[in-house]
Image (cartoon, rainbow, N blue to C red):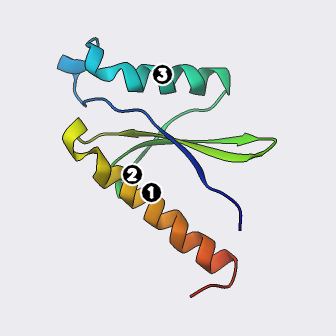
Amino acid sequence: MPKIKLIVGLGNPGREYEQTRHNAGFWFLDELAWQWKASFKDEKKFFGEVARVGLPDGDVWLLKPMTFMNLSGQAVAALAQFYKNQARRDFGGA
């Protein structure tokens, strides 16, 4: 079964947090996306912005949860659960 690669950058949504140290995780992912020529798309089912990057070793998902930091696990769990179910479906699991 292929490995799902996920990089999560933590931050807080909203203009008041854009230029604060609390969004260093968002800034890091923005830089990765720029280097890898990827763009983020708002994905409500994952509670955040997601970019998919195709690399030689496989896909990498970048996730910027649009929940506040203390609720970021909600976004991570949603994306991980979706791809866990997707992998089962793609590879004949339950």
The quadrant holding residue 18 is top left
- Give the percent coordinates (x, y) of residue 44: 35, 53
Tell me which residue sits at (54%, 64%) in the image. Answer: 83
Q: Is 75 or 2 nearer to us in this picture? A: 2
Q: What amino acid type is highlighted by mark number 1?
A: Leu
Residue 82 seen in the figure: yes
Q: What amino acid type is highlighted by mark number 2?
A: Val
- The local crowd at label 1, few if under 14, some if 14 to 19, many if 20 or more residues have their Cα within 10 Å, is many
Q: Report, in whole angstroms, how far the alpha carbon at label 1 lies from the one at label 3.
A: 19 Å
- The first of marks 1 and 3 along the sequence is 3
Quadrant of the snapshot with the C terminus: bottom right
The vertical placement of 92 against 22, above or below, is below
Q: Which residue is tagged 1?
A: 79
Q: Which residue is tagged 2?
A: 76
The vertical placement of 9 against 59, above or below, is above
Q: Report, in whole angstroms, how far the alpha carbon at label 1 lies from the one at label 2.
A: 5 Å
Q: What amino acid type is highlighted by mark number 3?
A: Phe
